[in-house]
Image: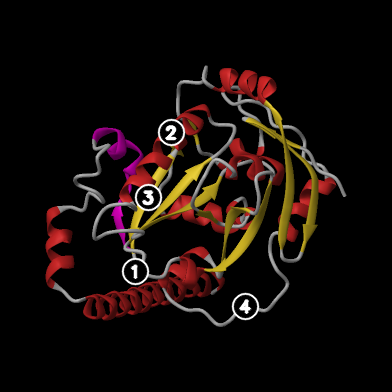
C-alpha cells in the first residue's frame, strides 16, 4: 500500500503500515509546503470548536482533502493488536490505555510508537492537553511557540522532564493527523480516540470553546490551569509555570502526594454516590408522576 503526505517541506511516500508501527520514507518538497504555510498564516481568528464544524469544512479554515480508504488503514495500523496490561488511575480513565509518539528511526524515516499511558506519564508533574488541528491557522502559529516552551520547561535544573503534553487532535482525517504530528515532540491520543467519542468528551469536560487550547493537569488529573494557551505568551520564561492559584500551590506544598491521592479518590466516590442518589430521586419522581397521570 502507498500513501502520500505533504507538509512543511516533506512528502511522505511509500508508507508501510504494520503492527509494530508505521515506517515512512521522506523526500523534500519545500516550495509547495511554503505556499501552504503562507495561506495558513492569513487566518487570524481562533476557530470555534463545534462538533458540526469539525465534521464540515469551515469558511475560515482550509479545506482538507477527502480521506481515502487507504488512509483509514493508517489509524488502525498505529495501534498494536497485543493485549495491554491492566492499568488504573485517573489519567488512564481520562486518556485511555494507549498513547502514541512519533519517533524518527533515521534521517528519512519515522515510526508511530505505542506507549501504555501509565508508562508515558510516569513521574510527570504537569500534563498538558493540547487541543489543536492542522486546518487551524492560529494553531499552526502557536504550535512552534509551544514546542520551544515545552523544551525549555523540561530542561530546567531540578525539574527535568516533568512536563508532558498529550495532543488531542482536532484534525478531520487520519492523513492530516499524521502530517501535523511530525511538528510535535510530545505524545498524542490515537487518531480514532482523539477524533471520536473520547476527544469529544474531553472537549466538553474542559469546556474547550476554541482552538488552540492548552489545559494543564496535575499527576492526578486535577485541573491546574485551563488557559495555558494565553499564559505562555505572557510568561515565555515560565517563571510562574504551571500557574496554579495560591491556594492550590499551598495545598500541594503542604499535603503529601499520597494523602492528596486518597482525598481525590474519596471525593470522586462521594461525587458518584451523590449523583447516583440525585438520579434515583429524579427517576422515582418521574415514575410517580407517570403513575398519577395514568390513574
Q: Which sits in the foreground, 242 or 295?
A: 242
Instruction: Look at discs 1 and 2 and give the one toward the viewer.
Output: 2
Q: Residues within 10 Å of mark 3 (few under 14, many from 20)?
A: many
The residue range painted magenta reads: 222-234
Instruction: Give the x, y percent position of residue 184.
Output: 52, 45
Q: Residues within 10 Å of mark 1 (few under 14, many from 20)?
A: some
Marks 4 and 3, how far apart at CA: 27 Å
- Please identify the quarter of the rendering in which residue 146 is found: top left
Residue at the spot of label 3: 215
Q: CA distance from mark 3 to mark 1?
A: 14 Å
Instruction: Please tell me which of labels 1 and 2 falls first in the chain.
Output: 2
Q: Which residue is mark 4?
A: 84
Q: Residues within 10 Å of mark 4 (few under 14, many from 20)?
A: few
- Which residue does the image show at 69% across and 31% down from the upper left? 64
Q: Name the element at disc 2.
A: helix
For label 1, the residue is 220
Q: Nearer the viewer, residue 238 or 213?
A: 238
Q: Label 4 near label 2: C-beta < 8 Å?
A: no
**Sequence order check: which comes first, mark 4 or mark 3?**
4
Q: Are marks 4 and 1 in contact (CB under 8 Å)?
A: no
| Earlier residue among tags 4 and 1 | 4
Q: CA distance from mark 2 to mark 4?
A: 34 Å
Horizontal relation, residue 69 to residue 252: left or right: right
The question of residue 110 being in magenta is answered with: no
Residue of label 2: 142
Q: Is residue 6 above or below residue 196?
A: above
Distance (Cα) linking label 2 and label 3? 14 Å
Amino acid at each position: 500500500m502507498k500513501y502520500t503526505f505533504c507538509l512543511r517541506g516533506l512528502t511522505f511516500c511509500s508508507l508501510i503500515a504494520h503492527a509494530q508501527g508505521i515506517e515512512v520514507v521522506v523526500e523534500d518538497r519545500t516550495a509547495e509546503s511554503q505556499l501552504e504555510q503562507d495561506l495558513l498564516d492569513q487566518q487570524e481568528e481562533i476557530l470555534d470548536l463545534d462538533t458540526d464544524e469539525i465534521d464540515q469544512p469551515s469558511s475560515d479554515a482550509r479545506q482538507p482533502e477527502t480521506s481515502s480508504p487507504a488512509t483509514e488503514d493508517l489509524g488502525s495500523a498505529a495501534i498494536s493488536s497485543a493485549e495491554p496490561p491492566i492499568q488504573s488511575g485517573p489519567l488512564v480513565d481520562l486518556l485511555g490505555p494507549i498513547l502514541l509518539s512519533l519517533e524518527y528511526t533515521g534521517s528519512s524515516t519515522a515510526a508511530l510508537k505505542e506507549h501504555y499511558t501509565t508508562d508515558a506519564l510516569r513521574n510527570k508533574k504537569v500534563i498538558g492537553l493540547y487541543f489543536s488541528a492542522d486546518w487551524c491557522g492560529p494553531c499552526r502559529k502557536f504550535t512552534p511557540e509551544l514546542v520551544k516552551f515545552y523544551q525549555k520547561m523540561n530542561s530546567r535544573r531540578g525539574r527535568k522532564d516533568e512536563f508532558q503534553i498529550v495532543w488531542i487532535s482536532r484534525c478531520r482525517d487520519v492523513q492530516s493527523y499524521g502530517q501535523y504530528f511530525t511538528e510535535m515532540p510530545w505524545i498524542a491520543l490515537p487518531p480514532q480516540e482523539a477524533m471520536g467519542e473520547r476527544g469529544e468528551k474531553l472537549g466538553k469536560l474542559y469546556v474547550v470553546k476554541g482552538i488552540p487550547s492548552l489545559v494543564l493537569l496535575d499527576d492526578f488529573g486535577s485541573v491546574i490551569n485551563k488557559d495555558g494557551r494565553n499564559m505562555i505568551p505572557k510568561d515565555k520564561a515560565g517563571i510562574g509555570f504551571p500557574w496554579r492559584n495560591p491556594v492550590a500551590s499551598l495545598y500541594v506544598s503542604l499535603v503529601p502526594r499520597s494523602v492528596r491521592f486518597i482525598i481525590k479518590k474519596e471525593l470522586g466516590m462521594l461525587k458518584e454516590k451523590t449523583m447516583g442518589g440525585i438520579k434515583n430521586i429524579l427517576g422515582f419522581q418521574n415514575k410517580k408522576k407517570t403513575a398519577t397521570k395514568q390513574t
